[in-house]
Amino acid sequence: MDYRAYYRKAPQMSFQDYCDAIAAAQGIDPQATARTRDAEGTIPGEAREKLFNIAAEIKNTFHEFGAPLPPLLEGCTVLDLCCGSGRDTYLAAQLTGAAGKMIGVEPNVERLAIAKKYLAKEIKQFGYGEGNVEFVQGAPENPPFLADGSIDVVISNCTFNLSPDKAAYIAKVRRVLKDGGEWYFTDVFTDRRIPQETSDDIARVAERLGGALYINDFRRLAQAAGFADPRHLFTWKTPLTEAEQAHYPGIAFATITSRLMATDMTEDVCESYGETVTYKGTLPDYPDYFLFDKDIKFPTGKACAVCGNVSGTVGYGSRYAAAFEMTGDRSQHIGDTHGDHIIACAPDFEGVVDEDDRPIQASCC
């Protein structure tokens, strides 16, 4: 199946025109279609207290409640795709510090105007001598003025599902990230493909539902772009009204926060190299453990055996490396972490016979 084509919308329109059509189709209440939750874990503690520094108009015209912000942003160059009125951009700007750099890219002129309106005031509120925030109008599939390998972290907040060309979006994120960089974002996914007619309907996409990807298609597109091992941290059932659900009979939605690392140290399956990592407990908001994904939580001070994909994410030059102690290296390959059932269950040829008692070459079924 051509997954790129299935998720490519309105090819007769430019990215800008498509984004403008989506914005026009959304209601006057900017948070009526919010799909993230302002719950424990969605806005990190170190960022939550900094919400008070952000102008009310910015917060009131933003389209989401939660905020996907990973740890250790200080000094980083961070790209916020489809930043809207800029709430997450300004939040992250306080976490990167004056030495960091925030770039907010937004296609909609009206929303971007709100973000820019408060720029000088926000920088003064943060106590920075010079601004560390830049807002640029543009589509996330082709953000202007961004060189390949120039970004430490890319964030996006329930806007990836609005993209008219998701394969192009993912590929661009992969290209602009530095080696060891991270795409950390929240978005809506489904348990199956949404019928083409529904997913092509701009009104349905504007609800931030019609453009949601089938979770396995996302993995395929991400791996094709060079993100070998997408990880999912938080998952919640996506809130839908009865009227909204009626457009998607039998389809289940989940709002998921994901982490994708731009590194050649990960593979498409979990391979073992005999490595261990020990979390030091030094990351903000994580004194007792570090949540790597929804299935892996590293307790402070405990050596944990890990696959090469995990060690490749938290070590080997990533910005998380200082928070971990590692043992082992890549000199010995032990194989599939979960075991290789194909080879492990292969029978000896000797003694395997067919119904006529003649030796055959057979598998163990």
Image (tube, rainbow, N blue to C red):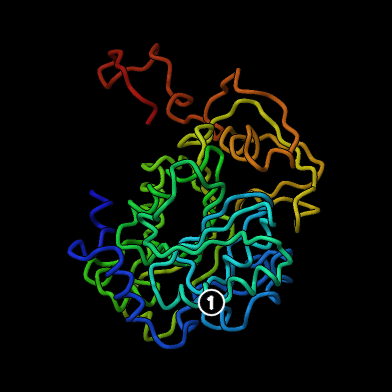
Q: Is residue 188 something one can see in this rendering?
A: no
Work out whether 18 lies above or below 290.
below
Say what amino acid the circle numbered 1 marks.
Lys
Image position, residue 76 (x, y; %):
62, 49
Image position, residue 265 (x, y; %):
54, 32
Image position, residue 166 (x, y; %):
34, 56
Numbered disc 1: secondary structure: helix
Q: Nearer the viewer, residue 4 or 17?
A: 17
**Residue farthest to the front, as pictured:** 129
**Residue farthest to the left, as pictured:** 12
Q: Nearer the viewer, residue 120 or 298?
A: 120
Q: Image check: 158 left or right of 20?
A: right
Q: Image check: 162 left or right of 157?
A: left
Image position, residue 359 (x, y; %):
30, 13
Work out whether 357 lies above or below 164.
above
Quadrant where the image shows the C terminus: top left
Q: Nearer the viewer, residue 98 or 240?
A: 98
Residue appearing at x 58%, y 67% in the figure: 88
Residue appearing at x 53%, y 37% in the figure: 179
Q: Image check: 60 left or right of 352?
A: right
Residue 57 quadrant:
bottom right
Q: Is residue 214 something one can see in this rendering?
A: yes
Work out whether 158 lies above or below 77.
below
Binning the other alpha carbons within 10 Å of mark 1 as few (below 14), some (14 to 19) or many (20 upward) gives few
Q: Image check: 53 left or right of 340?
A: right
Query: How many numbered discs, if any?
Result: 1
Residue appearing at x 63%, y 66% in the figure: 91
Residue 273 quadrant:
top right
Residue under circle 1? 117
